[in-house]
Image (cartoon, helix red, strand yellow):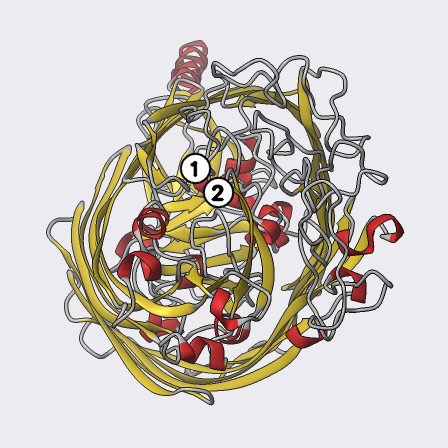
Amino acid sequence: MKKLTLLLMFTGFQLLFSQKEISGTVTDEFGEPIIGVNVIEKNTSNGVVTDFSGKYNITVNEGALLVFSYIGFKTTEKTTETSIIDVILMEGQQLQEVQIVGSRSPKRTVTESAVAIDVIDVKDVTTQSGKIEINQLLQYVAPSFNANKQSGSDGADHVDPASLRGLGPDQTLVLINGKRRHQSSLINLFGTRGRGNTGTDLNAIPANAIKRIEILRDGASAQYGSDAIAGVINIVLKDNTEGVSGNITYGAYNTNAKGDFLPGTPNTEGYRLDENGNGNSFGKDKKLDGESLKVATNYGVKLGEKGFANFTLEYLDKNKTLRPGYDFRKGFGEAEINGFNFFGNIATQLSDRTELYVFGGRNYRNTDAYAFTRNDGERVVENIYPGGFTPRITSVIFDTSIAAGIKTKTNNGWNIDISNTFGKNLFHYTIKGTLNASLEEASPTEFDAGGHSLSQNTLNFDFSKNYETILEGLNFAFGAEYRTEQFSIFAGEEGSYATYDVNGQVVTDPANQTIPVDPISGNPRPGGSQGFPGYSIANELVKDRSNISLYVDSELDVTQSFLVSGALRFENYSDFGSTINGKIASRLKLTDKINLRGSVSSGFRAPSLAQIYYNLRFTNFNSSGATEVLLSPNNSPVTRAFGIEKLNQEKAINSSLGVTANFGDFTTTIDGYLIDVKDRIILTGYFDASALNIGVSEAQFFANGVDTKTLGLDLVIAWKKNIGNALYTATLVGNINDMKIDRVNNGTLDEETFFGKREKAFLLASAPSNKFALNLTYKKNKFDSGLAFTRFSKVVLVDYSNEDDVYDAKIVTDVTLGYQFTKNLKLSIGSNNLLNVYPDKQDEIGDTEAGGYWDSVQMGFSGAYYYARLGFDF
C-alpha cells in the first residue's frame, strides 16, 4: 500500500511539472480584439474562450498544440513553445458580413484581392500620431495619398484638397459604408494642388467615428462610377457596442520658422502680426501658436441580439499659425478653425435575414484666414485703417449627410441592398476687417459675401449572389443607381460686390456717374469687399442634373489559385450624354505565399456642376500689385468668344501590375500603375480682357485643357512580431509618381496664356515625385511608442516672375510615447515634425503663389507641432 501511494504521488508530481500555463491575446488583422474565440488543446476537451479584451489563459500539457477557431475566420494552430502566444486571426471563407472596397465578393479578403487595397485601422493611426484631421492622418500612412494645407487661397484655406496618385481631388471617389459621399461645393482656384477641381471634404468626418479606412488604389469607374479614375476611399464607421471611449488632445506649433529672413520680415521675432489689430500692425512675440484643442467621444450600445447604435461627438478649436511672409502678405499661415461634428451609425435586425441601417451626420465649421495685405493706394481708406489693413476671409461650412437602407437575403441566396443617400455641403463667406473702398469713410468693415452649396441624392439597388459550385466559386453582382445633383451660388449683401459713386449710389451707368478717387494716387477706388468680393445677383444660379447607371460585376475563382474578375457600367447624364466603361482584373497564386495581380480598366469623370457654371469676379494679388479678374462660366458668351469649347467628360485608361508576398512576420505589396487621362479639366491662365469693357483686365476659364500620362509604383512592406512579451512593428510605405503632360489642347489659342509653364508646374506638383515613410512602433505592457520618418521628394513650382521655385527633398520626423495608467486611461505625448523642418526658403522678391516664403507643398509650412492626448475607455 505504501509503495502504491508513493507511485501515485510520483506520477502526480510528474504530471504537474509536465504542464504549463499559456496566455495571450487574439485580434483580427485590423488589431481589434475578438471576443469568444475558442482556444482548445488539440485532441483534448481542454479549452477556454477569449474575454472582452480578446485575452485568454489556459493550462496545457508540455508540447501541446493550441487550436484557435472562430466563425468567419481561418482556424489557426500554434505550438506552445513560449508562455505568451498572441494570435492574429485572418478572415476566412465563411465570412459573409464584411466586404472590402474593390471586390463585391463577400468571401474575398484583402490579401486575395486582384487590385491594390490599403486597410487602415484608424484607432491604431490616431493613437500613434498627433494629427487631428483625416487628411493629415492619411498623408503619412497611405503611399500615394497627398493633401495640402493652403494659405492665401480663399476657400481652399478652409478645406484641404486631397488626391491619390497625383491626380485631381475630384478623380477620387469617396464612399461611407460603401455608399457614395457627396463632394464639397468649393472649387479650388488659387495656390492649390488640383486647382480647378472640386473634391470631397474628408475632414468633415470625425476620426473617432471611423473603424477603418479602405483605399482602393486602382481605377474603378466601371465598378463605382464617375470620379473613380484614381481610385476609391471607403470609410467604414464604427459599430462597436462597448460603452464610451474617446480622447482629449491639446497641441501647439513652434513659431521659430527656419530661414535667414530680412530684418522686419512679418512674423519673425519682434514683428509678429497683432491679431487684435487691423492686420497691419505688430504685437507681442510668441513661442507657440496654432494652439488646438480636440475633444472626441464615441458611444456604442447593442440593439437586440445583432443590432447596434454607435454615436460620435467631436469638438475642434484650432488657432491660426502665422509664418514669415512678404510685406503684402503679413497674414501668411494656416486658418483658424472652430468646429463641431456629430455622426451616427445604426443597424437593427428586422428578421433573421433582414437588416435596417441608418448612418450619417452633421459637421459645422467656422473658419478664419487672412487674405493679402492692403498697405496703401486706392484700396485703403486711411480714416478707417491708418497705414493699411489685412482683410480676413471667414466662412461657415455646414456639411450634412444621411443614408438609410435595407439589406436582406432571399431563400435562394440572393443578397439585396436597397438604399438612399442624401448629402449637402454649404459654404457661406463673411469678410471681416475689410471695407468697400468706393464707400470711403462710410464703408462698413464686415460684409456677408454670399456663398455656394452642393446637394446630392443617390438611390441604389444592389444584388449579389455567390455560386460555390461553379468551378471554385463565382460571385455575381448587378445593380442600378439614380443620382441627382444641385449646385447653387447665392449672393451676398450689396456692399460686398457693388461699386458706389461719390453720392453713395450703386454705379449702373459708369459714363454718367463719378467714382471716388484716392487723393494720393488719383486712381479710382474699387468696389466690393477687399479680400474677397462677394457673389453678386448676377452670379446667382441654381443648376441641376441627373444620372442613371447600370452595372454588372463578377468574380470567378477558376481554380483555387487563379481568379478573374470583370465589371461593366453604363451611365447616362442628363446634361452631356452616355458612357460605358469596363474593367478586368486577375490574381494568380504563384505559391501559398506569393500572388501576382493586375488589372486594366477604362474610366471617366463627368465635369462637375461647379466647373460648368461657377463664375466670379475677384482680385488677384502678387508682388506687382492687384488685377481684377473674371472667372467666366463655361456656358457664357464671353467664354465662347475666346474659343473655349463646351466641357466634356475626362476619359482614362488605367492599368496596373503587382505582386504580394507574405512570409511569416513580413507582408509585402508592390504595385505599378499607368494612367492615361484625356481631356483633363483645368483652369486656364489669365487672358487679356481689357477690350471687353466689362470692368476687368483679365479673364480665365475651365476647359478640357490637357492630356496626361502618370507612371508610378506603390510599395508597402510591413513587419509585425512578438518578442517576449513585447510587440514590434515596422512599416515602410512608398510611392514613386511620374506625371507627364502629353498634350495641351489649346487649339488656336496661345499655349503659354492658355496653360503655360506656371500652370503646368502646379498640375505636375499635385504629388511629390516620390514619398517614403518608415513607421516604427514598440509596445510592452503599459508602455508604447512610435517613431516615423517621412521623406518628401523635390518639388518645383513656378512663381509669378516665371522663375522656378525649387523645394529640395526633406525628411519629417514624428514621435509619440504612450502609457496606460489604468484600464480606462492612457496618456500620450509627442511631436509631429519634431526637428522643426521647413521647406526651402524662396527669394526676397515675393512672387510665390501664397505670398509667404514657401508655397503650399506637401510637407507643410507650419513647423514642429507638440501635443498631449488623454485617451479614455469606459
Numbered circle sitting on residue 148:
2
Nearest the camera: 15 or 177?
177
Residue drawn where x is 61% and y is 41% of the image: 52
Q: Is residue 551 left or right of residue 782?
A: left
Q: Which mark is residue 735?
A: none
Q: Indicate whether 250 appears above or below 123.
A: above
Can residue 461 be seen? yes
Q: Quadrant of the N terminus?
A: top left
Seen from this angle, which residue lies furthest left? 590
Q: Residue at x 53, y 15 (%)?
A: 262
Q: Nearer the viewer, residue 116 or 665?
A: 116
The reply to whether residue 42 is visible in this rendering is no
Disc number placed over residue 857 in the picture, else none: 1
Mark 1: which secondary structure? loop
Left or right: where 518 falls relative to 31 = right
Residue type at the position of mark 1: Val
Which amino acid type corresponds to the residue marked 2 in the rendered image? Asn
On the rendered image, what quadrant is the C terminus found in? top right
Q: Are marks 1 and 2 in contact (CB under 8 Å)?
A: yes
Picture quadrant of residue 214: bottom left
